[in-house]
């Protein structure tokens, strides 16, 4: 056995957009163990239930994260709606699901760009982020926001999308699909990319299950969990199967996420093709009383919204369990045995969102 | 798409039953989906949720305890529970013993002690 040393990694690191610290126990240049520390950006958002009523909490919850903000609002609203037995009109469900899938596309493009940047492929990074801008433009046109959208409300949504705009969205996504095919070729068939990703940071199916991994990180290891199959939003009306891979390495994670962008575009197309008419939100009266665990599939995986209400305007408890929180143990496992040089890349492959995790 | 309708089960247990019940969940191959605490009517409510993804079953074990009650860590069965347990310990002051990676109330680096216990 060689001499062991500890290398501190983070909380500030060029490849990390958000702070996380790892004590890396290394032997030569191989990682033996990684001990994580988080907590640098804890904001105590869940504690605001004491000051903000259950309607206002919608806007607090969506500020959990600047990437999945729409889905946070949606998950929270669905949890409260389940407590209050409110049925969201079909059009409201479809609109929510369209925005949710748009969030998945822009989140995955953001991640692909960061990944390309991490292994030094600058032009690929620019291409991914250029495409992502188009999705943000569509968000701005349909909600008025590019980061925080504030279109969810308990009972449905606040804004509608007219037929003309839906057609515009179709043509933008069609164009994007063509461009994405070129980018996919580079990510999946370029020698440089392969050499950095293939066989790196393998997480087996059994490990992924035993460590409670979620989302594309778990699916890339062959664990077929996708909360959309639970049938919330418009998903029961849509034709899709969770995308998985059996390989479990960094390359498989990249493969799964790229294919999920194509899948998201297809889902949006399906929804626009059968968009129901009618109201976009239901009338909600009274205060919630009861509790519910709502699980939704965010770009990074299963997010859980727990709401406990007491019949007053103020909730007893609101808790968000984000997918990164679930994926940290899996990430630590992939680091064991890895080269020190691969650590930034491996952290990126779980697509970590630390602000989400710490709330 | 075939929708597997979710079934939610909420079962109240005592601290003495916790490890046995968790072992049962583990033996059934269920995934630990989340653990959270709530402070309601001067009691702590701890919820341990386990997911059976093939059937969409969601089983939550609920402990209702006093602030001082000692609770054993479940990291022996689910090692990755350490993050949830450290969070509950730090934010709610839950007296959890034997966590396999105990941050000693330094997970979130906050100055206030047990801020959610109010």
Image: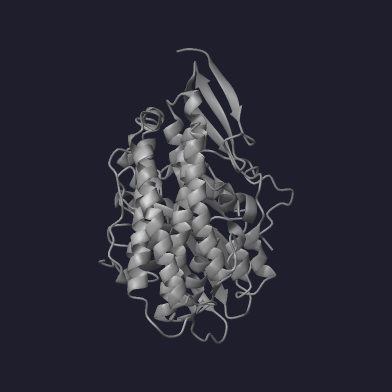
Q: Looking at the rendering, in which quadrant would you find the C terminus of chain A?
A: bottom right
Residue at (50, 25) in percent of width and height:
A341
Q: Is residue B98 left or right of residue A187?
A: right
| A342 vs B57: above or below | above
Residue at (52, 13) in percent of width and height:
A3
Residue at (52, 87) in percent of width and height:
A283
Q: Is residue A116 left or right of residue B57?
A: right
Q: Give residue A165's position: percent from left, percent from top.
A: 46, 72
| A110 vs B17: above or below | above
Q: Looking at the rendering, in which quadrant would you find the N terminus of chain A?
A: top left
Pick the front one: B61 or A343 = A343
Pick the front one: B31 or B70 = B31
Q: Give residue A79's position: percent from left, percent from top.
A: 48, 70
Q: On the image, which quarter does residue A270 sit in?
A: bottom left
Q: Residue pushed farthest top? A: A2
Q: Residue pushed farthest left? A: B2
Q: Is residue A208 left or right of residue A50?
A: left
Observer able to see residue B73: no
Observer able to see residue A37: yes
Q: Is residue A62 left or right of residue A249?
A: right
Q: Give residue A36's position: percent from left, percent from top.
A: 56, 37
Q: How many marks?
A: 0
Q: On the image, which quarter does residue A255 sit in?
A: top left
How is the structure coloured here? Answer: one colour
Residue at (58, 81) in percent of width and height:
A311
Q: Give residue A57's position: percent from left, percent from top.
A: 61, 70
């Amino acid at each position: 056995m060689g001499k062991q040393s500890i290398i501190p990694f983070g909380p500030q690191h060029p490849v990390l957009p958000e702070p996380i610290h790892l004590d890396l126990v290394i032997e030569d240049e191989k990682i033996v163990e990684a001990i994580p520390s988080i907590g640098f950006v804890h904001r105590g958002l869940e504690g605001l239930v004491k000051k903000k009523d259950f309607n206002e909490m919608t806007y607090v919850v969506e500020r959990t994260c600047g990437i999945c903000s729409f889905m946070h609002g949606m998950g929270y609203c669905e949890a409260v709606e389940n407590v209050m037995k409110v049925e969201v009109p079909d059009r409201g469900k479809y609109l929510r699901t369209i925005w949710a899938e748009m969030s998945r596309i822009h989140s995955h493009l953001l991640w692909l760009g960061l990944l390309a940047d991490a292994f030094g492929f600058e032009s690929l990074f620019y291409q991914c982020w250029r495409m992502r801008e188009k999705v943000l433009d569509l968000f701005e046109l349909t909600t008025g926001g590019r980061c925080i959208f504030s279109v969810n409300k308990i009972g449905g949504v606040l804004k509608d999308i007219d037929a003309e705009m839906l057609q515009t969205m179709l043509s933008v996504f069609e164009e994007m699909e063509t461009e994405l095919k070129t980018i996919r070729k580079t990510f999946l068939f370029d020698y440089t990319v392969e050499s950095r990703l293939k066989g790196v940071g393998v997480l087996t199916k059994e490990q992924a299950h035993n460590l409670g991994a979620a989302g594309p990180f778990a699916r890339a290891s062959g664990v077929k969990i996708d909360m959309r199959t639970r049938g919330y939003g418009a998903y029961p009306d849509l034709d899709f199967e969770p995308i998985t891979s059996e390989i479990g390495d960094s390359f498989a994670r990249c493969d799964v996420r790229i294919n999920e962008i194509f899948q998201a575009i297809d889902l949006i197309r399906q929804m626009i093709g059968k968009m129901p008419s009618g109201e976009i939100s239901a009338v909600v009266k009274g205060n919630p009383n009861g509790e519910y665990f709502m699980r939704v599939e965010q770009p990074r995986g299963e997010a859980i919204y727990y709401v406990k209400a007491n019949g007053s305007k103020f909730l007893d408890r609101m808790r968000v369990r984000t997918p990164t929180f679930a994926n940290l143990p899996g990430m630590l496992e992939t680091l064991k045995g890895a080269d020190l040089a691969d650590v930034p890349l491996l952290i990126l492959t779980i697509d970590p969102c630390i602000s989400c995790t710490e709330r | 798409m075939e929708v597997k309708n979710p079934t939610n089960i909420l079962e109240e247990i005592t601290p003495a039953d916790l490890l046995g019940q968790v072992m049962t969940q583990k033996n059934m191959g269920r995934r630990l989906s989340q653990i959270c605490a709530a402070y309601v009517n001067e009691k702590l409510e701890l919820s341990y949720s386990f997911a059976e993804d093939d059937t969409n079953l969601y089983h939550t074990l609920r402990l209702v305890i006093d602030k001082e009650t000692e609770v054993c860590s479940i990291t022996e069965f689910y090692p990755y529970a350490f993050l949830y347990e450290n969070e509950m310990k730090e934010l709610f002051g839950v007296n959890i013993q034997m966590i396999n990676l105990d941050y000693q109330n330094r997970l979130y680096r906050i100055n206030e002690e047990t801020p959610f216990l109010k």
